[in-house]
Amino acid sequence: MELPTLDQLQALIPLLPKKKPVHKLKWKLPEQRFCAPIEDAEKRVFELEKLKAKFVSGGEFMDVVHAKPYGEGVFAYFIVRTEKKTEDEHILFDGYMIQEEEPLGLNLSSSFSFMEDLEGLGYKQSLQRAVTEWRFLMLPVKVAVFDVEQFGAFMEFALPATNFENDRKRQEKKLDDLFKKFGLKKEDALPTDVITLQWLSQQQEAAQGQGPDLDQGGPG
């Protein structure tokens, strides 16, 4: 049997199914996060490792969280983070709700001087926490496990921002699959991040007189 010539192959092109044009949205679909309470953080970490999730980062930290509202239910955080073992200090920025493209991470020579700068930028101290965290990637979903002292353990799932509706549909399908694999109910998950959940819980306790009012200007 003779091999087809180039002309014969090119003649087949009109017969091949044409790809539908991909419509790119002018405005990105924003990052979405969901967090679910869990009983045992280390057990969930073991399950993630068993599923071959890619470990990204983790450790034990002391955080001082500063918050700034950008409107009703829209906010950003600067986190002054100290690693427990090394006592190294970093500044972390989390502004997924205001559509920041790049997270900001800075090494600090003096966290205290930077805290004063944060005040001038409109960020006020909202809470302090001791947290152990593990961060994984299960494309396209980011999965984090948090064990927050005196608050609880949580799994947090993040769907990255995208300009394409089909990408978001694939992300949501993967998220549904992950909830099933971990035995979690999506309807019980909260559409927010763990820091916000802790801050709101703290405010509720203060309003009910169960603890000190530590509100110094967190999200609105």
Image (cartoon, rainbow, N blue to C red):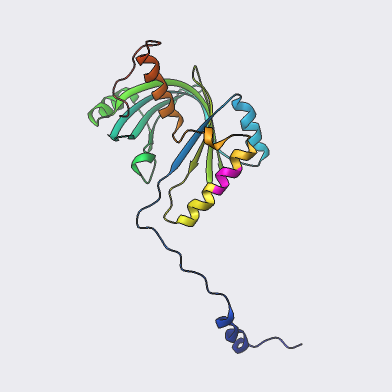
Query: Is residue 98 something that shows in the picture?
Result: yes
- Nearer-the-camera pick, 119 or 82: 119
Query: Is residue 140 something that shows in the picture?
Result: no
- Nearer-the-camera pick, 142 or 22: 22
Quadrant (top left, top right, bottom left, bottom right) of the C terminus:
top left
Residue sticking out furthest to the left: 120
Tell me what residue is drawn at x 49 percent, y 16 percent: 150
* Vertical side of 32 occupied by 188: above or below: above
Quadrant (top left, top right, bottom left, bottom right) of the N terminus:
bottom right
Image x and y of residue 113, in percent? 29, 24
Tell me what residue is drawn at x 48 percent, y 51 percent: 168
Query: What segment carries the magenta color?
Result: 173-177
- Nearer-the-camera pick, 39 or 80: 39
Image x and y of residue 154, in percent? 53, 28
Name which quarter of the figure residue 39 lies in: top right
Name which quarter of the figure residue 98 lies in: top left
Image x and y of residue 157, in percent? 51, 38
